[in-house]
Amino acid sequence: MTTILFAAGRRLWAEYEVPLRTALDATGLDYHLTCEAAPETVDYVIYAPGSRLQDFTPYTRLKAVLNLWAGVEKITGNPTLTVPLARMVDAEGLTQGMVEYVTGHVLRHHLGMDAYITNTAREWRPVVPPLAGERPVTILGLGTLGLACAEALRALGFPVTGWSRSVKTIPGITTLHGPDGLAGALRSAEILVLLLPDTAATNDLLDAKTLAQLPRGAVIVNPGRGPLIDDAALIDALDSGQIAHATLDVFRTEPLPAEHPFWAHPKVTVTPHIASETRVPSASRVIAENIRRGEAGEPLLHLVDRDAGY
Amino acid sequence: MTTILFAAGRRLWAEYEVPLRTALDATGLDYHLTCEAAPETVDYVIYAPGSRLQDFTPYTRLKAVLNLWAGVEKITGNPTLTVPLARMVDAEGLTQGMVEYVTGHVLRHHLGMDAYITNTAREWRPVVPPLAGERPVTILGLGTLGLACAEALRALGFPVTGWSRSVKTIPGITTLHGPDGLAGALRSAEILVLLLPDTAATNDLLDAKTLAQLPRGAVIVNPGRGPLIDDAALIDALDSGQIAHATLDVFRTEPLPAEHPFWAHPKVTVTPHIASETRVPSASRVIAENIRRGEAGEPLLHLVDRDAGY
């Protein structure tokens, strides 16, 4: 009997219980899924960053912690969590949702839609935008999400440059890596998409210096992590015209405080962390598959590298 | 010597002369490209709907008329034009531009972007949209443009239904045809894209009756032809909530008159006929290829069916 503790809160339990049982039943495992269990009986914990469970010390039999979300920055620093930690990589939900958000907002900026949507001019002034082939896009971060977005944008005809910490080779995409590659990735980016994890190395990656390396009038789309951007430097760059627009889905503090200047800035679009969200049925299948793997002695999927922080 | 008359006006001559010569040189033909020639010496006419040349009677040697644009509705009724007429099908320009416009505006409506772009609420209220797989899109018209858009939307995950006059089979796309298939194509369309030609059969295709066949709250994107829509019926359907929004790129009268109610309607986005435009270098190659074919006795590309009107 495999005991699985759902420690992601009562609200999510209501959403996840049935889909998780369906997915676990399909694995053929003999399991006990519960949201209350004596710590020393628990084999797996299904987790969310805001969980009340913070001290893993009494979970002496614990084999792995399976996070329901992609972001693990609030968990990796927990010194009591010493077993393997898996993040959520939900191709149907997280990845597809992110591809839709990024493709949609890149096309929005590429086509100059906002002027027509707000329709303040009310005049017929045809300005045909360039084709995608003339609009270089750079994606910072080539993990699962960045890669999927890069490929969707390339399929639509955009010349895509991708930048990552370590060397990657992706057919049809210009790849650059490491600190030395960053300036080159920024230099050509008429539209810049941030899909990096939040780590010590990526904090304030977009600051006054790197914002100045973008071509004048570049647009920024950030559905990655709030701390990637130095907010004050971005506002300066927007005010000076160096950056034409920023579409931001993630922030250092969420919900974005009412007094934050992003809300009222005419060159900022705020979306409330909706770019990508775990979808219950597909996420439940990912969790069940990892528990099956754990019980079969197979390596878990989507393990977090605790040193890198993602 | 093949004589080619450029009869599409002085402004376009300035744009096209050099690219056309480049493209014609590449064919190896012995040609004379001019914008003034005695009618009886002309082998091919390069044409645009607004051209001053309306009487083709004196063009006794004429082999074909090559239109610079995709739309030919202002030409097909000309009784003096009896030689083959080719429309422009410019994959790099018209088709790619249309795919970008349609994909962009479908994603915009799918993701509910406008509320964030206009940002009137300034409040954090996360509403995660459904995935593309849960958002059925119907495209009316499966010509070159409709087909390319259908495939791009399908690749992004949308369930796509396509409707055309005659039977078509396209992998991965639900196809319906003819008057009997129209109601079914409309019934499921949360987003409806109009890419039909302007013919007697398509005039007012979207009227009070067909608008009522769409699901309540459907969105309409029309980058096809203005007369496809009964304007007054659309405004009624927007006002009643039957149609949530209309994004219109083409109109019965262009430029759209300042007093037309579309300009000020809060549920209408007007774009000034920018969805798709012939691009000079690629269009020049299409024209040159058709002249090469004509001189080699090969069938011309993109011939207009004069009876169908497109």
Image (cartoon, coloured by chain):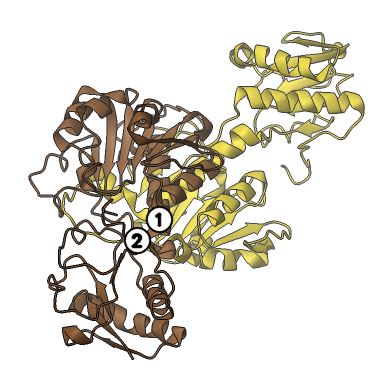
Chain colours: A brown, B yellow
Query: Residue A253 location in percent, x, y?
Result: 13, 51
Q: Which residue lies at the image location 73% right of the left edge and 21% below the top edge?
A: B46
Residue type, mark 2 in image: Pro
Residue nearest the viewer, comparing B234 with A5: A5
Query: Residue B287 location in percent, x, y?
Result: 74, 25
Secondary structure beneath label 2:
loop
Q: Which residue lies at the image location 36% right of the left edge and 54% below the top edge?
A: B111
Query: Residue A297 location in percent, x, y?
Result: 42, 76
Q: Residue B129 carries which label?
A: 2
Looking at the image, do the residues carrying marks 2 and 1 touch, with CB atoms under 8 Å apart?
yes
Query: Residue B297 location in percent, x, y?
Result: 92, 29
Residue nearest the viewer, comparing B135 with A29: A29
Q: Can residue A291 be seen in this view?
A: yes
For the C terminus of chain B, give its image quadrant. Answer: top right
Q: In this view, does B272 lie above or below B292?
A: below
Instruction: Residue under label 1, please give it.
Output: B110
Toward the right, the furthest residue is B297
In the rendered view, does A4 fall on the left or right side of A11? right
How packed mark 2 is, by other alpha carbons closer than 10 Å (few <14, some 14-19, many 20 or more), is some
Residue type, mark 1 in image: His
Q: How far apart are marks 2 and 1 (CA)?
A: 7 Å
